[in-house]
Amino acid sequence: MHFHRRRGWEIPEREATPRHLVLNRRALMAAAGAGAMLSAEAQAQWLFGGRSGSPSDPWARNPGDLPDLPEAMRNPRYQPGRAVSPERDAITFNNFYEFGSNKDIWPTALRMPVRPWTIRVDGMVEAPGEFGVDDLIRRIGLEERVYRLRCVEAWAMTVPWTGFQLSKLLDIVKPLGSAKYVRLETAQVPPHMTGLRQTWYPWPHIEGCTIEEAANELTFMPVGLYGRPLPPQNGGPFRVVFPWKYGFKSGKSLSRITLTDQRPKSFWETLQGNEYGFWANVNPDVPHPRWSQATERLIGTNERVPTRIFNGYGEFVADLYTNLQRERLWA
Amino acid sequence: MMVFGLAMLLLAAAVAAWFGPGAPLGAVIFAIHPPFLNTLQAGVQRRLSPDLWNDAFLPLLEAPGWLVPLLLGTLFVLLGWRRRGHG
């Protein structure tokens, strides 16, 4: 297997992003940099002073002074087949319900402290434990994978995640043979997660998958995005990604992973189970109750392209579902 | 108008009795129809303003569930009372 060793100064998306988008991004970054210099005092105030104003720079560092990520090689096994989305779009157009229903939740999310951050892994495992994110990064090591991301809302991005396979974490805790499902729990961080004020919702936000899905080579635990620490609006500091499922299945800002023999009922299943089910595998032929899934809009270019079954990852995951045809696999 | 007002007062009493006096309006609505508030929130925050939800809708939804029907009921009973020439 060939790995391309990325040097520190290289920007990963340059390899795949069209030149005009790269230049656009440079201009935006320059503007953001100038803005940062001009408003350093204001930014320090919102970062550390607790004022209620909004940050102006989506590249701002999070409270807690995140360490840089160690160098990670891009894994060439997972070719996205299309251009990487502009970084600015990826970090300013987000779904993270704990911070709100709107897409521009990043100014609120960026205030969430992300260090120290630990994740508990428990349930049906031989060696349960609580792990610091930075300890896991050192222990398991990192790689970069460029995955397509398909939202249930019929938009899509292509982003370079930095992280490790969930299976490597499972190797550490050693699942028992009786474990059938993995329950993924998002942290609750009031008052930063303003959505938690809505106490009637079934917090914490739960997602889940089968043990076979968790052990699949595609299931990835990102701690970084575009070579930088994963920002909270994208699920930082630590999340899961199932690239063949609709995005809402990929739990963000995880604080606990539990292996169990009971199928977890997810947050969205509880709220709108007829629209957001347990499996939620991407399928262009199965429409959402309120819209078609036949095509998807690429964020950054607004180009509309055909949706692919399993988001194009069928060769890796289709076998997982051969004996599950009675399940509602596509919603 | 008077009938509507009295119905709202009855509703306020029923909500307090059924869900408890401290249950927020949001919890009452969620118990009756779970997807409603999520859809409403998405509509308000994406099409109008995120702050409108946080600053106007949320405080209302956090108030006790009986409060809104009580206020509406009282208002309509008073208006109905005046309309009948008592005010």
Image: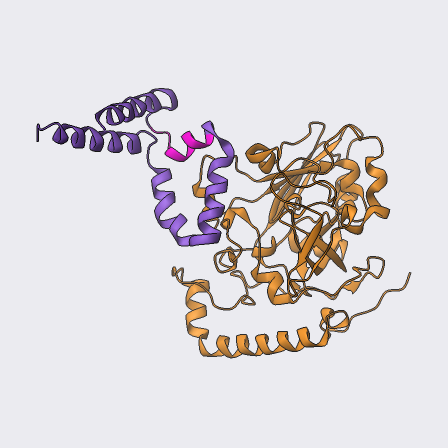
Chain colours: A orange, B purple
Residue at (51% x, 68% y) in the render:
A57
Q: Quadrant of the N terminus of chain A?
A: bottom right
Whole-percent x, y for residue A300 in the image:
64, 65
Q: Quadrant of the C terminus of chain A?
A: top right
Residue at (48% x, 57% y) in the render:
A108
Q: Nearer the viewer, residue A112 or A308?
A: A308
Residue A44, compared with residue A136, is above or below; it is below
Q: Nearer the viewer, residue B3 or A87?
A: B3
Instruction: Give the quarter of the image for residue B19.
Output: top left
Is B42 left, or right, of A162 in this rendering?
left
Tally of numbered tags: 0
Whole-percent x, y for residue B56 in the image:
35, 47
Whole-percent x, y for residue B26 in the image:
41, 35
Q: Residue furthest front?
A: B84
Q: Nearer the viewer, residue B4 or B12?
A: B4
Q: Residue furthest right?
A: A1
Give the dominant element type of the magenta stretch: helix, strand or loop.
Answer: helix
| Residue A63 visible here | yes
Q: Nearer the viewer, residue A256 or A152?
A: A152
Instruction: Give the quarter of the image for residue A177.
Output: top right
Is B58 left, or right, of A282 in this rendering?
left
Residue B39, compared with residue A106, is above or below; it is above
Residue at (56% x, 61% y) in the render:
A92
Whole-percent x, y for residue B73 in the image:
25, 29
Q: In the rendered structure, does residue B29 fall within the stretch colored magenta?
A: yes
Residue B79, compared with residue A35, is above or below; it is above
The magenta span reads B22-30
| Residue A143 visible here | no
Q: In the rendered structure, does residue A299 fall within the stretch colored magenta?
A: no
Residue at (45% x, 69% y) in the render:
A43
